[in-house]
Amino acid sequence: MDLIIFERKAFEEFATKIEQFILRVSNSPVVKNGKKKTNNWLDHQDVCQRLKISKRTLQTLRDNGTLAYTKIGNRTYYLPEDVDSIITKVEDRRKEAKWKGREI
């Protein structure tokens, strides 16, 4: 058996990171809702097509909290219900932007 020795500070940092990881996993919608399948989730391309928006606009919707999302690894997924719930907001923004002579 090998013995590995950690400095207290390094061990505490490691333990904190493990606790943060456990919190992230336990707060994941997959765990909270008991949904283990992601086959009904949408990726960024699906969302952009459904809402007729650019990737940058999608990023803005995520950043300002308008659209809920889940990151699994390096991929970002969206629930169809969440996307459908913001369709009217996006349409309103599109009308407002068109009125100002811009596009979204």
Image (cartoon, grey):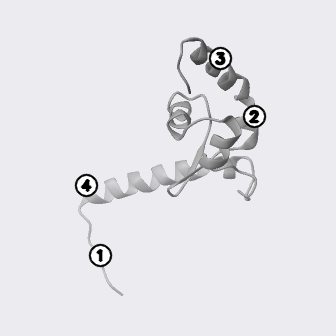
* Residue nearest the observer in this picture, 1 or 79: 79
Secondary element under disc 2, as helix, strand or loop, is helix
Earlier sequence position, callout 2 versus callout 3: 2
Q: Is residue 83 left or right of residue 53?
A: right
Residue under the point 39% across and 51% down:
16
CB under 8 Å between discs 4 and 2? no
Mark 4 vs mark 2: give the one in front. Answer: 2
Earlier sequence position, callout 1 versus callout 3: 1
Residue 103 is situated, as x and y percent measured from the top left of the image, at 55, 25
Q: Residue furthest top?
A: 99
Compared to residue 29, the image places residue 82 above or below, namely above
Say which mark, if any, is on residue 84. 2
* Residue nearest the observer in this picture, 87 or 31: 87
Compared to residue 50, the image places residue 93 above or below, namely above
CB under 8 Å between discs 3 and 4? no
Specify the quadrant that holds the N terminus: bottom left
Measured in 3D between alpha carbons, the distance from the residue under mark 2 to the one under mark 1, in whole angstroms, is: 52 Å
Say which mark, if any, is on residue 95. 3
Residue identifier under label 1: 4
* Residue nearest the observer in this picture, 87 or 54: 54
Measured in 3D between alpha carbons, the distance from the residue under mark 2 to the one under mark 3, in whole angstroms, is: 18 Å
Secondary element under disc 4, as helix, strand or loop, is helix
Q: Residue furthest bottom?
A: 1
Residue 78 is situated, as x and y percent measured from the top left of the image, at 65, 44
Residue identifier under label 4: 9
Earlier sequence position, callout 4 versus callout 2: 4
Tell me the amino acid under the disc marked 2.
Asp
CB under 8 Å between discs 1 and 4? no
Earlier sequence position, callout 3 versus callout 4: 4
Compared to residue 4, the image places residue 89 above or below, namely above
